[in-house]
């Protein structure tokens, strides 16, 4: 079952209300499923969906401790972001995604789940960066990731992950989750595989 197609069907049937901009993007993506330039593989996104729903839990009241069950649009987003590949090279078509969500609609929790999935599922030696305009803003996402990690007995196992004052790291595959902001002194030396930037609309320059 394709979550992307299910989401498109919900919108086209009128059961889910969406803006014209989103409808336009989804229409192009639906057409691209039959474009010979691309391969659409549902599995990479669905592996991450399964990880989040199995291991990640909410950390904020009133849902603290409850399993993180993704909504259909979140599943469609993940499946699409990881699913499209260039047929000629086999590489992912999309390396960047802009996610526009109104305030207090769970974007930090969603991104924290994605970061944890990448931390545990990606190849070794990867830097995962939580970035924002200030250290305080970057810390919000970083702490949400760590709180979510600590909620799970499997994820907080010291053989799989540890935390110090600088980063969360894996003794097994040497992956790290770090903070970065415009206030950070050293912005070099990162081997960034996954970078999540919060509060992009407040940025005054492109330092981060």
Image: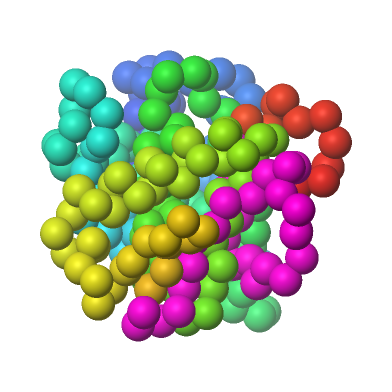
Residue 132 in sight: yes
Judging depth in this view, the residue of 90 and 194 nearest the camera is 194
Percent across and percent down for residue 32 are 59, 53
Q: What residue sits 76% from the left and 31% below the top?
A: 203
In the rendered view, does 107 fall on the left or right side of 27? left
Q: Is residue 63 above or below residue 196?
A: above
Screen quadrant of the N terminus: bottom left
In magenta stretch: residue 64: no
Q: What residue sits 75% from the left and 59% below the top?
A: 186
Q: Is residue 2 above or below residue 198?
A: below
In the rendered view, does 174 fall on the left or right side of 160? right
In the rendered view, does 207 fall on the left or right side of 164? right
Percent across and percent down for residue 48 are 34, 59
Judging depth in this view, the residue of 34 and 99 nearest the camera is 99
The residue sitting at the front extreme is 165
Q: What residue sits 39% from the left and 29% below the top?
A: 106
In magenta stretch: residue 172: yes
**Count of labels shown?**
0
Q: Tell me where the magenta segment starts and ends, as one range.
A: 171-198
The residue sitting at the right extreme is 205
Q: Is residue 29 above or below residue 20?
A: below
Q: What residue sits 67% from the left and 79% below the top?
A: 88
Q: Is residue 160 above or below residue 181?
A: below
Percent across and percent down for residue 201 are 70, 26
Residue 39 in sight: no
How is this picture coloured?
Answer: rainbow
């Amino acid at each position: 079952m394709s979550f992307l197609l299910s989401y498109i069907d919900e919108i086209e049937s009128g059961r889910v209300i969406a803006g014209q901009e989103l409808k336009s993007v989804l229409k192009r993506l639906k057409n691209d499923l039959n474009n010979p330039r691309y391969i659409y593989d549902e599995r990479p996104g669905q592996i991450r969906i399964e990880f989040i729903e199995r291991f990640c839990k909410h950390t904020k009241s009133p849902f603290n401790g409850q399993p993180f069950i993704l909504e259909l649009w979140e599943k469609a987003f993940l499946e699409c972001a990881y699913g499209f590949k260039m047929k000629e090279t086999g590489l992912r078509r999309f390396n960047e995604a802009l996610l526009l969500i109104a305030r207090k609609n769970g974007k930090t929790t969603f991104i924290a789940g994605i970061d944890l999935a990448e931390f545990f599922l990606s190849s070794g030696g990867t830097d995962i960066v939580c970035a924002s305009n200030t250290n305080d803003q970057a810390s919000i996402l970083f702490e949400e990731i760590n709180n979510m990690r600590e909620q799970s007995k499997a994820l907080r196992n010291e053989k799989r992950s540890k935390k110090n004052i600088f980063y969360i790291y894996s003794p097994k595959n040497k992956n790290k989750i770090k903070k970065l902001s415009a206030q950070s002194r050293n912005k070099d030396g990162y081997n960034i595989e996954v970078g999540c930037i919060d509060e992009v609309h407040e940025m005054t320059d492109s330092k981060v």
